[in-house]
Amino acid sequence: MNRKWYRYLISFFGALLIAIASATPSQAHWADLSVAEIVVKDTQTQMTLTFPTGLVATADDNKDGQLSSSEVQKHQAELQGFLSDRIQLTDDNRQTPTLTIKPTDIGNLPANLKAQGTTHSTLILTYAWLQPAQGLKIDYNLFVPNVSTARCVATILQGGKVEQRIFTPTDRLFSQKSISESSVWQQVGNFVGLGIEHILTGYDHVLFLVSLLLLGGGINYLLKIVTAFTIAHSITLSLAVLNLVTISPRLVESAIALTIVYVAAENFWRKDVKGRWLITFVFGLVHGLGFAGILTEINIPPSQLPLSLASFNLGVEIGQILIVSTVFILIQKLVKPAWQLKLRYFLSASVIAIGIFWFWERTFLAV
């Protein structure tokens, strides 16, 4: 066997063992995500909440991953106590509303509130006030424990006005007054942060960008791939969020895994970076559909869609620049030339192994 190919195979199988041992199963964005629609009236606040059933696993008697009407009825007191503690409502007069919980007919829910697969449940939480609520305040603390990326995307409706709010473990509070005074900047900050987080924790997107940089290249190459990727994913992200293009998430996620495998494999035979911006653009179109997933899931109100989309895309760009600049500096400045080729082969082999694993998981194991 040619010694070069022998080296490739040793590199691949060594990396394969490490990759399979260390690669975590890919998770849909719904895994740590809750979605709420909150309708505020004078003496009643109603929240339709879709959340991970694992948070109330003791009420899921048959362990099917979703709370049935009978389970909600049986565990009413337990659920009321738990949810009252984790989602606290009050107002300027320090009122504490009375909470009642009901199951809901999934068929009547909008797409963004439907429980996903067998992992989430949907409940209607009704908070009754003795007096009309003045200056509603919400402390939302219903998150998967020890998961910093857990989120609840809430749509708040009152008197014909619609507000979008993203609750996080470090940003749990909603104030009706503060949100009305700075709603635009709050919305921008929420979705820029969501975009940054989405790409930094989207390990498939990260590995794709890293693989593009392993072949080397200077500043001009860096600018070309960043520009190509930005333009491409912005196109499909916008088309998907605006519902002009609809493709099965399962197909998109599987295709993203294949883009990772191809780019990493190309690092074994490609001699230079000339023209690589083109493949970056083509594959960037696929990744844009992946970026759109979370925005289509939360069903942003049409009036807020342009600003939310632009802010999210800006966040993705900031995250992308952080990734490529860090990897570029590490490769160019810290890795000795004598080690660059070996590092390229080993890391590319690792990425191929992870990409194959993700493709198999997303294609054949996805629910």
Image: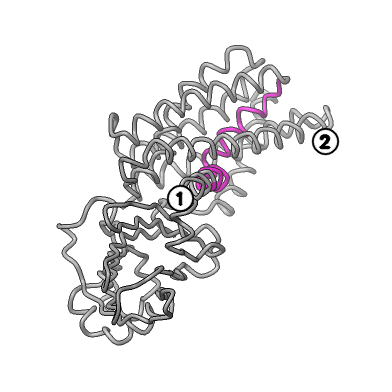
Mark sitting on residue 351: none
Q: Name the residue under label 1.
A: 183
Observer-nearest of 130 and 290: 130
* Mark 2 or mark 1, earlier in chain: 1
Q: What residue type is labelled 1?
A: Ser
Disc 2 marks which residue? 334
Q: Residue at x 49, y 23 (%)?
A: 231
Q: What stretch is highlighted in magenta?
A: 193-217
Q: Please state which of residues 119 and 269 is positioned toward the viewer in this rendering.
A: 119
Viewer-side residue, 49 vs 189:
189
Residue located at (50% from left, 39% from top): 355
State the predominant SS element of the stretch in magenta.
Answer: helix
Q: Does residue 40 appear to the left or right of 29 in the view shown?
A: left
Tell me the colour scheme of the image: one colour
Asked if the magenta segment contains residue 212, the reply would be yes
User: At label 2, which amino acid type do we have?
Assistant: Leu
Q: In which quarter of the image is residue 68?
A: bottom left
In the displayed structure, would residue 354 be above or below residue 267?
below
Displayed quadrant of residue 52: bottom left
- Taking the spot 50% from the left edge, 65% from the top edge, the residue there is 172
